[in-house]
Image (cartoon, rainbow, N blue to C red):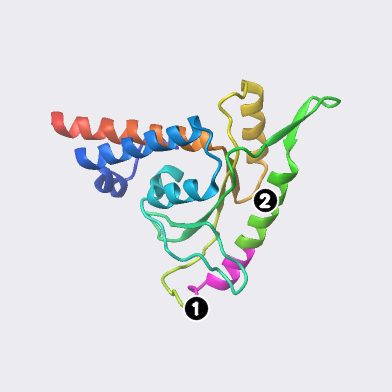
Amino acid sequence: MGKELSSELLTAFRSSIRLQELRSAVVQLDNYLESGIKDKQKYQQWCEEQPWASGNSFVVNDNVRAISASDKINLMLPTVITGYRDLVELKRPDMKVLNHDNSHQNYYFTSEVSKVIGQCHRYLDMFQEEAARGLRDHPEVIAYHPKAIIVIGCSSEWNKDKHRALHGLNSRLSSITIITYDQLLAQGEKMIDIVSGAYNNDEEN
């Protein structure tokens, strides 16, 4: 997440009431994780209500879930600047993200992560094909080089090498990013810090 937000995002978030809502949402996600809640539906509802936590390009989400006759996604997010849609796929926070190869001393994606990467590749292909000029029943939903965010597992107990490994593996993927629920939480906290700083500066001026 960048250190600065667009004027559109600041306009959407810049109020003391909205800031308190964001803080409450982050506390709620933290409580879910600390309590060991594994129910994917809980996290999906949270992400639907708090799309801004997925990155500093998103403020709202779409209600559309079907991107083709046979493919339904967890979440679709329009970017603030362009309006083009990106996809979010959620898995459970108790799923393992990385394995370690002791013989080669490197980390690699687990079979669960590999499966969801393949799943998202299909979604992106189908979405690009079906919505290049807008979905049939939702012409406002347009796909143009869409990307996917996969949220899976937790990383609060990872060491620096494991975090570095995920960063490296992500950098070699195309149009897909894997983050953990702890990283999603950290993004939300960072967003609040940035918006809060901008709000305080406005108050002083």
Q: Is residue 80 above or below residue 36?
A: below
N-terminal-most mark, 1 or 2? 2
Crowding at label 2, few (<14), some or many (≥20) Cα neighbours within 10 Å?
many
Image coordinates for residue 113, horizontal then vertical, percent? 68, 45
- Residue positioned 55% across, 60% down in the render: 73
Q: Is residue 135 magenta?
A: yes
- Residue positioned 32% across, 35% down in the render: 23
Q: Amino acid at mark 1?
A: Arg
Would residue 105 appear left or right of 89 to someone viewing this image? right
Residue 165 falls in which quadrant of the image?
top right
Q: Is residue 136 above or below residue 91?
A: below
Instruction: Say which of 158 and 160 sits in front.
Output: 158
Quick check: can you spot residue 15?
A: no
- Residue positioned 49% across, 73% down in the render: 135
Q: Is residue 164 magenta?
A: no
Q: CA distance from mark 1 to mark 2?
A: 26 Å
Report the quarter where the C terminus lies: top left
Helix, strand, or loop for circle 2? helix
Would residue 19 appear left or right of 117 to someone viewing this image? left
Q: Residue furthest bottom?
A: 136
Residue behind mark 2: 117
Crowding at label 1, few (<14), some or many (≥20) Cα neighbours within 10 Å?
few
Marks 1 and 2 in Cβ contact (< 8 Å):
no
Residue behind mark 1: 136
Residue 163 falls in which quadrant of the image?
top right
Would residue 184 appear left or right of 24 to someone viewing this image? right
Image coordinates for residue 8, horizontal then vertical, percent? 29, 50
Segment colored magenta: 125-136
Quick check: can you spot residue 154?
A: yes
Report the quarter where the N terminus lies: top left
Would residue 191 appear left or right of 162 to someone viewing this image? left
